[in-house]
Image (spheres, rainbow, N blue to C red):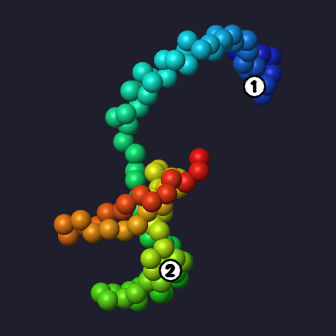
Amino acid sequence: MKGDNMNEPEVPKVRSVQFGELSEESESKTPQSIELLKDVPLTVQAELGRTKMLVREILKLGVGSLIPLDKEAGEPADILVNSKLIAKGEVVEIEGNFGVRIIEIVNR
């Protein structure tokens, strides 16, 4: 039984934790540690612009419909990694495929 009163929650036991000190030696191991992350997949997106539309407007869309975006023609596309803006780029065509050439890295 948890106690005399069944309505009283059990109190968890709490204890202190000791962490080791960071040293220059542990920082020098960072380049080796980054190797663990090199095979982690990330989602990369190139965003030309955005807009908000009502459902009734979306239902009217068809082949040839135009969707106005919040950017001007020729403005750089946003390059996002896991939905975080990391760079700006220009849309290019390479052998019939579209791509984005990075023109600016956004301040971190």
Residue that carries the numbered disc 2 in the rendered image: 72
Judged from the image, the secondary structure of the residue bearing numbered disc 1 is: loop
103 sits left or right of 98 in the view: right
Q: Quarter-wise, where is residue 4 in the image?
A: top right
Q: x, y (%) of residue 100?
A: 36, 62
Q: Earlier in the sequence, mark 2 or mark 1?
A: 1
Q: Marks 2 and 1: which is nearer the front?
A: 2
Q: Residue at x 38, y 37 (%)?
A: 40
Q: Is residue 46 above or below residue 38?
A: below
Q: Quarter-wise, where is residue 66 in the image?
A: bottom left
Judged from the image, the secondary structure of the residue bearing numbered disc 2 is: loop
Of 48 and 83, the residue lying toward us: 48
How crowded pointer 1 is (Cα within 10 Å; few <14, some 14-19, many 20+) is rated as few
Q: Residue at x 73, y 12 (%)?
A: 16
Instruction: Give the total number of marks visible in the rendering.
Output: 2
The amino acid sitting under disc 1 is Pro
Which residue appears farthest toward the left when viewing the image?
95
The amino acid sitting under disc 2 is Glu
Of 53 and 43, the residue lying toward us: 43
